[in-house]
Image (cartoon, rainbow, N blue to C red):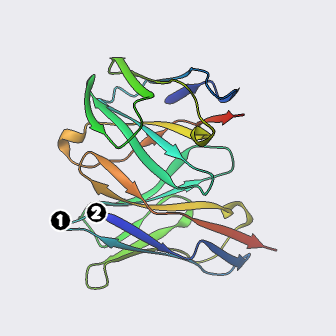
C-alpha cells in the first residue's frame, strides 16, 4: 500500500491547457507539500498545507492553485500551461511541521510535459 | 535563510571504493539536516537525518554522515560502493515549515 500516491504519473499536454495532479497520503500526517523538480534536478518548494491550512506559498505564478479538501489529500491545479511548467512535480507529507522540520515522505512524482 | 551547498554535481567511484558526497550548510539556528536518495524515475527516499542527538548518524544501505559544526558540513560516506548505489543524492536542511534541498550529486559507480 503506497504511502504517498500521486496521479497521474505522466501528463503530456499542449500550451494553454489546464491540468490537475492529485495526491493522497495514508500515513496520518498533518502536513503536505508540493515540490517542483526542474530538468537540472533542482527541487523547489511550492506550497505546503498543515491540516488543510495553507502555510507555505512560495513565489509561484497565480496559474498554480493548490487545494486541500482534507489533511490526507493535496491537489495541484495548473491553468494556462506554459512550456516552462514542464517538470516533475512531487507531493510529500510529514508528520507535523508544528513540531519542527521533520522527515518528508515523497510520492513517485508526476512528470508534466508541455508541448 | 537556511541553505545547503553540495560540492560536485557528479561523482564517479569504482565498485568497492569509498563514497564521499559533500554537503555544507548555512543556518542561523541549529540545523536539522537530511540526506535523500533518488533512483531514476522515482521519488526521494530518506537515507538519514541529523537532529542534534549524535554527530555521527547512521542511515540505510550502509551510509553514514557526520555533523561538523566547526566546518558547517554534513558529508555522506559509505565505505564500499555497490553498483546499486548509483543514483542522485540530495542534502537538505530544515527551513521553517519545509526542507531546502541542495542541487544534488549524481553518483556513478563503475565496475
- Compared with B109, B101 (above or below) is above
**Is A10 on the left or on the right of B27, as rendered?**
right
Q: Where is residue B92 in the image (x, y as percent from the top left)?
A: 40, 59
Q: Which label sits on residue B84? A: none
Q: Do the residues labelled 1 and 2 touch (CB within 8 Å)?
A: yes
| x 71%, y 69%: residue | B108
Chain letter for mark 1, please: B
Query: In the rendered image, which quarter contains the N terminus of chain A?
Result: top right
Q: Residues within 10 Å of mark 1 (few under 14, many from 20)?
A: few
**Is A77 on the left or on the right of A100, as rendered?**
right
Q: Report which residue position mark 1 lands on.
A: B29
Q: Position of residue A93 (x, y in %)?
A: 39, 35
Q: Residue lying furthest bottom in this view?
A: B70
Residue B30 placement: quadrant: bottom left
Residue A21 placement: quadrant: top right
Query: In the rendered image, which quarter contains the C terminus of chain A?
Result: top right
Q: Residue lying furthest top in this view?
A: A69
**Is A105 on the left or on the right of B18, as rendered?**
left
**Is B109 on the left or on the right of A24, as rendered?**
right
Chain letter for mark 2, please: B
Q: Is mark 2 on a helix, strand or loop?
A: loop
- Going from N to C along the chain, the mark reached first, 1 or 2, is 2
Q: Report which residue position mark 2 lands on.
A: B2
Residue A25 placement: quadrant: top left
Amino acid at each position: 500500500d503506497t504511502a504517498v500516491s500521486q496521479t497521474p504519473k505522466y501528463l503530456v499536454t499542449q500550451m494553454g491547457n489546464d491540468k490537475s495532479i492529485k495526491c493522497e497520503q495514508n500515513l496520518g500526517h498533518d502536513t503536505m507539500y508540493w515540490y517542483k523538480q526542474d530538468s537540472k534536478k533542482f527541487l523547489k518548494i511550492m506550497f505546503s498545507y498543515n491540516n488543510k491550512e495553507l502555510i507555505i506559498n512560495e513565489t509561484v505564478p497565480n496559474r498554480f492553485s493548490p487545494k486541500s479538501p482534507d489533511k490526507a489529500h493535496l491537489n495541484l491545479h495548473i491553468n494556462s500551461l506554459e512550456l516552462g511548467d514542464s517538470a516533475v512535480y512531487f507531493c510529500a507529507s510529514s508528520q507535523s511541521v508544528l513540531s519542527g522540520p521533520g522527515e518528508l515522505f515523497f510520492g513517485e512524482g508526476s512528470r508534466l510535459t508541455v508541448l | 535563510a537556511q541553505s545547503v551547498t553540495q560540492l560536485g554535481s557528479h561523482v564517479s567511484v569504482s565498485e568497492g571504493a569509498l563514497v564521499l558526497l559533500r554537503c555544507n550548510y548555512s543556518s542561523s539556528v541549529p540545523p536539522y539536516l537530511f540526506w535523500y536518495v533518488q533512483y531514476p524515475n522515482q521519488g526521494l527516499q530518506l537515507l538519514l537525518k541529523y537532529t542534534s542527538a549524535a554527530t555521527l548518524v547512521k542511515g540505510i544501505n550502509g551510509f553514514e554522515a557526520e555533523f561538523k559544526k566547526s566546518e558547517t558540513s554534513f558529508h555522506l560516506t559509505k565505505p564500499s560502493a555497490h553498483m546499486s548505489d548509483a543514483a542522485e543524492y540530495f542534502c537538505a536542511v530544515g527551513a521553517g515549515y519545509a526542507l531546502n534541498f541542495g542541487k544534488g550529486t549524481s553518483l556513478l559507480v563503475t565496475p
